Amino acid sequence: MITKLSKFKDSWLIKVILTLTALSFVSLFGITSYIGSAGKNNPVIEVGSYKINKSELNEEYMHELQMASNLFGNDMEINDAMKLAILQNIIQKDLTNGILSQTANELGVSISNAYVRNIIFSQAEFLDADGRFNKEKFNRLLALSGWNENKYIETLKQDIIKQHLVYAIVDGFNFPSFMKPYLEKVANQRKVFKYIVINNDDLKIDRKISQDELEQYYQDFSAQFTEPEKRDASFIVLSVDDIAQNITPSQEEIQSYYDEHINQFVTPEKRNLLQMVFDNEDDAFKAAQRLDKGEDFYKVAQEMAQQDKSATELGWVAKDELIADMGDRMFAAKINEVAGPVQSDMGWHIMKLIGIQAKKEMPKDKAFAQIVKDIRKNNAFDIAYDKIAQIEDEIGAGKSFADIAKDNKVKIHKVEDLDDAGNAKSISKGQEKLLKSEDFIDTVFSYNPNEVSQFLEEEDGFVLVNVDEVKEAHLIDIEKVRPQIEEIWEANERNAIAQEIINDVTHDLENGDNINEVASRFGLKLNTTKPLKQNETFANLNALQMKEMFQEALDAPKVFNMDKTSIVAVAIKNIIAQKQLGEEELNALTTKADMEIMQENANSLLDAYGSNFKIKIDYKEAGLSDI
C-alpha cells in the first residue's frame, strides 16, 4: 500500500512542491468533486481505531495548496496533476502516521510532553538573542506557516515516533563495499534501444456505435449522465458593515484602544546586525583584532567561530531584543561599525551594524480613523449576535422568512439551481462569493423546502437561508448525452485496437522475432536511440521506467502505457565504458544507493507494521478514484 501511494508523477516541479510543502516548518480527476462535497465528513483513512475524516483531509489539502502558492507566488497556476500529487502525498503521510500511531500504542511507546517541550525550547528558530526560548517568536513563526501550537506539537510527536520506530532501526544498512565495482560498472553502462510508439489518436475505427452499445454505455456510465440534485433558495444577509455605520465611538474609547494597541501604530527603530559568538575571551579578542585590520566579517566568523552565513546574520532587531550592553552600543553606532567583544551567558559577542530601519509611527489622525473602524466592527458583532438571538426566537415562534426580512429592513436574495459543488444558474448580484462558501452550500442542502436555517457566519456578516425548492437528481435524456457516450465509446475502441496491436507485437517479440521485422510486418514506425545512460531518457519515459528498461535483458520487450500513448521497447546493445569514475562521483553514487536501501527498508518496515491492522482507504471519498 505504501508502495502504491508513493508512485507519483515525476515532474520536477511536482517534486519541488511536494518537498517544500513537506518541509514547510518542520520537516484531475476527483479534485473538484472532492472539494465541493467536503461537507460530508466521512472517514477517508482508517488504521485500526485511528481515523482521518474528510474534513481533516480537506483542511490539510487546502493548507498545502496555500503553502505551494506562498512558495511559488499567487500568479503561478497549480494544475490538476500537481493538486493530485499533493493530495496523494497527504494521504501517504496520514496513512504512515496512522500505522505508526497504532504500532506505538501496541508497543507502549509514548512521547512525554516534557520531552517535546525540551525539543521546542532548544530549537534555534524559537530562541531570542540571549539564547532563551521566545514564546512570541514561536507563535509568530507558527502563524506564518499557518499552523497552531497543538498541530505543531502533534506533528513533532509523530516525527519522533517515526524516528524511533522506523529510521533508528533502518539506519546503518549501507551499500556493501564489495559491490562498489558493480555499482561503477552499472553507472558506466550505456544501452541502445529500439522502440515503437502506438498513439491511440492515430488509430482508425471502421464502424459506428450500435444502439445496444449506446444504451449499455448509458447504463454503465450513468453517474456521468446524471443531473445532480439542485436547489432554489432565498436568503437574507445581516451586514456587519451596515450595523457598524450607525455606531459612533467616544473619544475616550478611541484613546483607550490606541494606548492598548500601541504596537499596531508605532514600530520601533530596528537595526540589521551581523554577529559572531565565542566560548572564550581570547578567541573573541583575536577575532576583533582581525576585524580592526579590515578583514571581512563573514570570513572571520567562518574561520574563528565556525559560523556559516546564515548563523552570522542576526537580522533586523529592536534595541530591547539585544543583550543590555550591546543594545546601547549598536543603536548608537554608525553603518559598518563593529562593537565588542561583550560577554553574556551565551559567550562573547562581536556585532556589526549593516542597516538601519527608522522608527515608524502612524499619524494619530490616520490611526484614529482605523481605530474607529475596528471599534465599530467589534461593537457591530455584539449587536448582531443580540439581533440573531432575537430572530431565531421569532423563527421558533413561527414567524415567516418574509416577515423577518421586512421587520429588519433587509433585501431577500435568491440563488437558483444551486448544486452541491457550488455551481448555480443565477444568484443575486453582489452575493456571488457565497457560491465559494462550503457553509452556505451545506446549509442550502441541509434543510427541507420552506424550512428556515440557523444563521451562519460569513466574511461580511450573517446569512439566514430559506429553501424554496428541491429539484431531485435525474438521468439526462440519452439523446442529449449521445455525443459524450460516443466519445467514451471511441476512446475505449481505440484502447482495444491499441491493446490488440501491443499483444501481437509483444507475442512475436517474445517468440524471438526481430523488432525490425515486427515493425515492418505491422506497418509501424521504428525508432532507435543513441547510446543512453540510465539517467537519460527517450520517448518521455520517467526515471523509474528507464530503471526498468536497464534491468531488462537484450531483446526482451517492455511495454509502457502513458495516457493515450503506448510504447513497446527493447534494448538491442549494451556498451560498457572502460573509464573509471572519480572518487567524488563514486561516493555520490554510493550515498544515493545507501539512501535507496534505507528507504526500501523503511517502506518494508512500514508494510510489516501495517499488516497488523485493518486498513481502509476510501479513494473515491478522498477524490482519488482513479488510483
Image (spheres, rainbow, N blue to C red):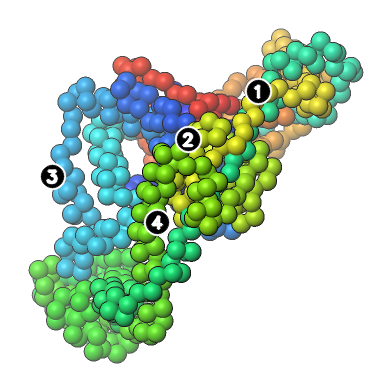
Q: Amino acid at mark 1?
A: Ala
Question: Which residue is the site of mark 3?
Answer: 114
Disc 4 and disc 3: Cα gap in Å? 44 Å
Image quarter for residue 125?
bottom left
Residue 356 in sight:
no
Tell me the tag on residue 39: 2
Label 4 or label 2, whichever lies nearer to me, is 4
Between 124 and 466, the residue placed more toward the observer is 466
Identify the residue at horizontal 30%, vertical 22% (top origin): 49
Sequence-first disc among 4 and 2:
2
Give the residue at x 71% y 22%: 475
Vertical position of residue 32 compared to residue 240: above or below: above
Task: Classify 400 as above or below 279.
Answer: above
For the residue pair 249 and 191, the one nearer the viewer reads as: 249
Mark 1 or 2 closer to N-term?
A: 2
* Quadrant position of the C terminus in the picture: top right
Residue 538: x and y in percent read 67, 36
**Residue 146 or residue 251, whichever sits in front:** 251
Q: In the shown orientation, is residue 32 left or right of residue 407?
A: right
Report, in whole angstroms, how far the alpha carbon at label 4 lies from the one at label 1: 43 Å
Residue placed most toward the observer, 229 or 44: 229
Q: Which residue is mark 4?
A: 384
Callout 2: few (<14), some (14-19), or many (20+) C-alpha neighbours within 10 Å? Answer: some
Mark 4: few/some/many CA within 10 Å (<14, 14-19, 20+): some
| Cα distance between the residues tagged 3 and 1 | 53 Å
The residue indicated by pointer 1 is 223
Q: How many marks are shown on the rendered structure?
A: 4
Q: Which mark is residue 285?
A: none
Amino acid beneath label 2: Gly
Which is nearer the N-term, disc 3 or disc 1?
3
